[in-house]
Structure formats: C-alpha cells, structure tokens
Amino acid sequence: MLQDLAERAKRAAASSALSTEDGKTRPGRTRATPIDASSAKLLCAALIAEAWTYFHGGDPPPRNQDAAGAAHTLWRASGGETKGWGNDPLNSWRYYFKEVQAPALGKVRKECQRHLEEAERLSTILSGK
C-alpha cells in the first residue's frame, strides 16, 4: 500500500493542476480538481435541468426562476450554503444553467434520465395500465 501511496503522491506532485512546469506549487486558495471535474452546484443544476427536460421537453432557460427555485431548494436540502448575486439568491443559478450542456455532465444527466424513465415504468406497472 505504501508503494501505491508513494506513486500517487509522485503523480499528484507532477500534475499540472497542482504545480507549474518548473515543479513549484501553484498559488491560490482554490482546490485542485481534475480537468473534467464539475462543481457541486453545476451537478445540482444538471439534475434539475434533466428533470426539467423530462417534463418540459428541453433544458430550462438560464433565467427561468422556477428552475432556479428548484435548484436552490435541492441545493439547500443537500446542505449547500446560500450565496446569491444581489438580493435574490436565485440569480446565482443563471451561470450554472448556461453550463448544464457541458460534456463532463453527460453521464450524470444520462443516469438521471434513466431513473426518471424507470420511475415512470414502475408507476405504470403499479397503476395497472
């Protein structure tokens, strides 16, 4: 296990996300993330966007207050902090709803779609239709 840990540490130290070309640690407060990583708020917006697409036939516009309200409610229910732009915390969701088509979110959205379709099938079976 120590060899594996040492190898991972070596790869992390050489990672362009953590250090510059000359081997110095990158400055700044932000966390190092993989290149294709998505923020938690973006994942939340993607789940709401996929549910919106399921029921409405397409992604919500970035300024849609109902979608922003749903995302904000999900975010708060999952323990997220509320920080808004201006007086309305829902305004902060515009950016995330503009980004929900990112390729990195494809798997998350596809899995959400699968769950929605399975729930519909189960509902049909249980209702006897």
Image (cartoon, rainbow, N blue to C red):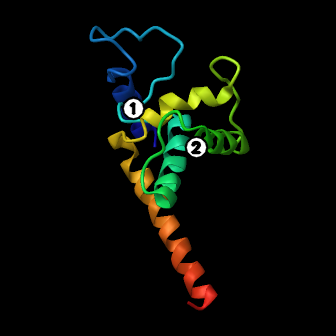
Residue that protrudes farthest toward the left in the picture: 21
Q: Residue at x 45, y 65 (%)?
A: 114
Q: Residue at x 68, y 35 (%)?
A: 80
Tell me the amino acid under the disc marked 2.
Ala
Q: Is residue 21 above or below residue 115?
A: above
Tell me the amino acid under the disc marked 1.
Pro
* Residue 112, image x, y percentages: 49, 58
* Residue 42, image x, y percentages: 50, 37
Q: Is residue 39 above or below residue 117?
A: above
* Residue 118, image x, y percentages: 50, 73
User: Which residue carries the number 2 mark?
Assistant: 67
Q: Using residue 21 as the reference point, say whether residue 30 is left or right of it.
A: right
- Report the front residue among 34 and 1: 34
Q: Residue at x 39, y 34 (%)?
A: 8
- Report the front residue among 4 and 11: 11
* Residue 29, image x, y percentages: 54, 13
- Report the front residue among 15 and 50: 50
Q: Using residue 80 as the reference point, say whether residue 17 is left or right of it.
A: left
- Report the front residue among 19 and 83: 83
Disc 2 packing (10 Å; few <14; some 14–19; many ≥20) = many
Disc 1 packing (10 Å; few <14; some 14–19; many ≥20) = few
Q: Using residue 77 as the reference point, say whether residue 27 is left or right of it.
A: left
User: Which residue carries the number 1 mark?
Assistant: 34
Query: How many callouts does the rendering have?
Result: 2
In which image quadrant can residue 18 be found?
top left
Q: Residue at x 48, y 70 (%)?
A: 117
Mark 2 vs mark 1: in front = 2
Q: CA distance from mark 2 to mark 1?
A: 28 Å
For numbered disc 2, what is the local secondary structure?
helix
